[in-house]
Image (cartoon, grey):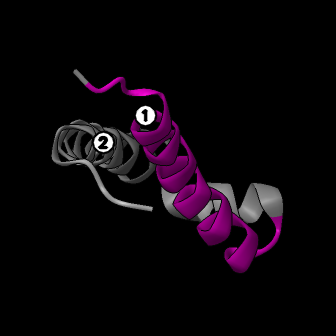
């Protein structure tokens, strides 16, 4: 699979913005420890947050059209 520069650029921009929004949400508003207490497992919260960043970024890369 050859990476396309345009698709990679849009996916990277989306990934950075989405990551910043999640950091603001998790660290600032929801408090990470509250999520860990609610879910019960540190690992589950970490993995779900990583997937919440990677999967939408991958979707943006896949669905971005080339010229």
The residue identified by callout 2 is: 11
Tell me which residue sits at (38%, 54%) in the image: 27
Residue that appears at 60% across and 70% down: 46
Q: Which mark is residue 60?
A: 1
Q: Is residue 46 magenta?
A: yes
Q: Tell whether 14 sits left or right of 51.
A: left
Image-based side of 40 in relation to 36, left or right: right
What is the span of residues highlighted in magenta in the rendered image? 40-66
Residue name at image x 60 percent, y 57 percent: 51
| Prevailing secondary structure class for the magenta stretch in the rendered image | helix
Counting residues from the N terminus, which is met first, the one under dot 2 or under dot 1?
2
Q: CA distance from mark 2 to mark 1?
A: 6 Å
Q: Is residue 56 above or below residue 39?
A: above
Looking at the rendered structure, the secondary structure element under dot 2 is helix
Q: Is residue 27 above or below residue 43?
A: above
Q: Do tag 2 and tag 1 residues touch (Cβ < 8 Å)? A: yes
x then y, percent, for residue 2? 35, 60
């Amino acid at each position: 699979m050859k990476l396309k520069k345009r698709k990679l650029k849009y996916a990277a921009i989306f990934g950075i913005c989405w990551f910043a929004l999640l950091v603001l949400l998790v660290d600032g508003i929801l408090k990470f420890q509250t999520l860990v207490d609610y879910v019960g497992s540190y690992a589950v919260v970490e993995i779900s947050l990583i997937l919440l960043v990677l999967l939408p970024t991958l979707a943006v890369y896949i669905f971005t059209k080339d010229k």
